[in-house]
Image (tube, rainbow, N blue to C red):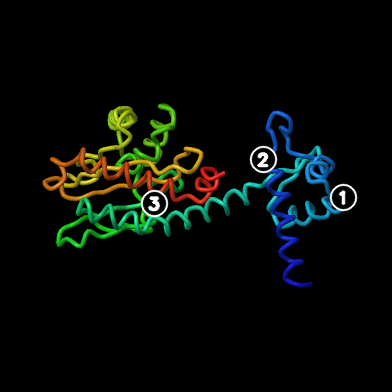
Amino acid sequence: MNAGSKQSGAAKIMALLEVLGTADAALHPHGMTVSEVSRALGRDKSIISRQLKSLLESGLVSRDPTGCFELSWRLYALASRAGDQHLAKKAGPVMRRLTDNVRERSHLTVLSDGEVLTVRSESSRRSIETQGWVGRTIPVGRSSSGMALLLEHDDEQILEIARASDPNSTKRQAAAFLEEIKRSRQRQYTIANRIFDPEIIGIGTPVRDFSGRIIAALNVSGPALRIEEHIHIFGTHLLAAAASLRQADPTTTAVTSA
């Protein structure tokens, strides 16, 4: 089989996955049948059946008892992981500019099993700064990133996540965390004033994908004595950096130029 055939086969599989991924949920609440996929793609039903069987065996699609097919959770997990890696790479230049502007360490974080996981960190190169934390997690209720990642969750979800992520927190602390998120929604950046550490202030903002969904958070943190008088300025820099990351999304670029 030559390279052209391989590419053609991969393109056909991709088209099949796109049909399943963009199916109207109202018309196809349980997924799509082989016949429906075949009609949508204009391909022979027997060929579609073989391709779906192969994808089912690999775990990239799932089939319900009625025989309908849909994208599997494994595929969504793989796509999410790839998205995190792509974002971490794209964030490098943006975070370096951010760090140079505010002269404090910056972090890129995601939600992982109810905690805040740092996936990238840029040093301010100052003699006194916060730690890098790459690969480490902290409870959502103790960071500006945690607040930013939860900005669009409903209030009950926020309280539940905050309590679950930090068993030592009290109901009063969870309620205070929720109130700070409510205040943050209008200004679009969050402030963790001496919550994680009595001498540290963190400021965070959500990073969104092309659809507006929150997929990560950017934050800067450092000694309170250096940051406290400049919170609004830091917040402005963070909002600009997050906007740059969203614009850098290749899907956004494709949609904008279409």
Q: Position of residue 97 (x, y in %)?
A: 28, 55
- The C terminus sits in image quarter: top right
The N terminus: image quadrant: bottom right
- Distance Cα–Cα, label 1 vs label 3: 46 Å
Mark 2 sits on what residue?
22
Which residue carries the number 3 mark?
117
Q: Nearer the viewer, mark 1 or mark 3?
A: 1
On screen, residue 103 versus residue 133, left or right, reads: left
Instruction: Confirm or deny contact between disc 3 and disc 2 (CB under 8 A).
Output: no
- In the current view of this chain or complex, which residue is farthest to the bottom? 2
Residue at image location 50% in from the left, 48% down from the top? 253
Residue hosting label 1: 44
Q: Residue furthest front?
A: 257
Q: Is residue 92 shown above or below 179?
A: below
For label 3, the crowd category at 10 Å Cα-Cα, with few meaning under 14, some 14 to 19 and many 20 or more, is: many
Q: Secondary structure at mark 3?
A: strand
Residue type at mark 1 is Asp
Q: Earlier in the sequence, mark 3 or mark 2?
A: 2
Nearest the camera: 237 or 228?
A: 237
Question: What is the count of numbered marks?
Answer: 3
First in sequence: mark 1 vs mark 3: 1
Residue at position x 79%, y 55% in the image = 51
Whole-number angstrom distance, CA of label 3 to CA of label 2: 30 Å
Type of the residue with mark 3: Leu
User: In terms of image quadrants, where is residue 23?
Assistant: top right
Q: Secondary structure at mark 1?
A: loop
Left or right of 21 in this view: 228: left
Q: Secondary structure at mark 2?
A: loop
Residue at 22% in and 59% down: 124
Q: CA distance from mark 1 to mark 2?
A: 20 Å
44 lies above or below 141: below
